[in-house]
Image (cartoon, rainbow, N blue to C red):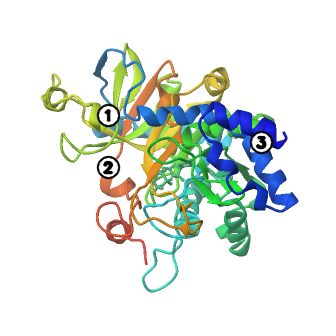
Amino acid sequence: MDRAQAYEKLKKYGQEHVLRYYDELSGEEKNALLSQIEDTDFSILAHAAHPHVETGKGKVTPLGALELDQIRANGDRYRAAGLKAIREGKVGAVLLAGGMGTRLGSDDPKCMYDIGITHPVYIMERLISNLKDVVREAGVTVPLFVMTSEKNHDKTVAFMKEHDSFGYDPEMIRYFMQDMAPASDYEGKVYMESRSRMSTSPNGNGGWFLSMKKSGVLNRVKELGIEWLNIFAVDNVLQRIADPVFVGATIMNGCDCGAKVVRKAAPDEKVGVMCLEDGRPSVIEYYELTPQMMEERNEKGDYAYNFGVIMNYIFREKELERIVDEVLPLHVVEKKIPYLDEAGTFVKPEAPNGYKYEQLVLDMVREMNSCLPFEVVREREFAPIKNATGVDSVETARALLQKNGVSL
Ligand code: UTP
């Protein structure tokens, strides 16, 4: 693409400012910017004009979960089925670690964050340690796939190497990168992060399977004969990964996907809730729940929309292949985006200053024919680290880890 073609493309989307410094750039920088312009889908920036419009919601009705007492009653059978699948090599784990973790405020990838008090305890170390529990129990190593982005890939891989993958067999780990999307101000004008580069951010956690396919890592999934992929977020340091009971329950209930859920702390808690939409599994965002829905009760007298998702899902691989080419809805998310200001100075904002454009895992659940919400005990399996202090922070996660006997 030459300058004239780049200009035409930018003009179509009202983004001509991207070439503002073009004439001052070196030849190499010019080429880099032109190829970034060529590769960028600017059409998504039009969503800035209506960031909160929801894509056609169907009729939402409650979806009950497999609750703790039912899980306990069938625990041995579920565990045996899950362990069998793991031992047969049918289960892989996928760590979604491509996010920027802006709320935590560290420049390093979130997995490198040290939450220790008397000795270093890295987030990644905690996750691997949790996975190793299952490896010990099953007697086989669960293949682990780690999704990064171009912003944190090299650091993540180097960190794992430096720490000998925290004792996990490196042969059983594969890394792949997700795609990026432009980030803009509130008017949908793309920000520049330098004179020769537009600001980009990872395109959300919903593109993970497509990125696995594009990167070639999916071939490995097939070679290994993996039939189930358990995806999990980087920031929940208590979560169980490839949990045999969860795996077994999903298989034995004949579902295409399973979602770990926790009982909500309050009807208005800000978590996405499992539900049915036109009879199909779905996740409704907390801000979409009306006051009536929040108060609605089921036949047991419990709140009908009572189970929040914790970003730990298991998917039947074949079903993911069926939907891999479906275009998922785009979510417009308000975030802090570093940018070049009018004077050409690089600014790292303290508060949100624009939008990122993301596809989300929860929209993959909507594409499944069936989903098993699987209740877990919050204090044992849910310690997310989103913020440096306050709610869902390093402090709250530390307290929960200590409660569960983890030495910090
Ligand atoms: P979050 O919703 O917490 O987003 O991600 P984030 O970008 O990491 O953090 P903030 O909002 O900027 O503070 C939930 C999970 O999804 C992964 C994250 O790494 C985390 O495990 N994720 C998020 C991706 O893998 N890619 C993305 O593009 C976004």
In the picture, measured across the screen, residue 58 lies left or right of residue 91, that is left
Residue highlighted by disc 2? 377
Image quadrant where residue 59 sits:
top left
Name the quadrant of the N terminus. top right
Tell me the kind of residue under disc 1: Gln
- Vertical position of residue 294 compared to residue 101: above or below: above
Residue indicated by mark 1 = 70
Towards the viewer: 134 or 255: 255
92 with respect to 219 (left or right):
left
The first of marks 3 and 1 along the sequence is 1
Residue type at mark 3?
Ser
Q: Quick check: marks 2 and 3 in contact, CB under 8 Å?
A: no
Image depth: mark 3 or mark 1 in front: 3
Q: CA distance from mark 2 to mark 3?
A: 36 Å
Residue lying at 84% horizontally and 52% vertically, measured from the top left: 31
How far across and down, in percent of the image, does residue 228 sit? 62, 34
Residue ID for mark 3 = 215
Q: Is residue 126 visible?
A: yes
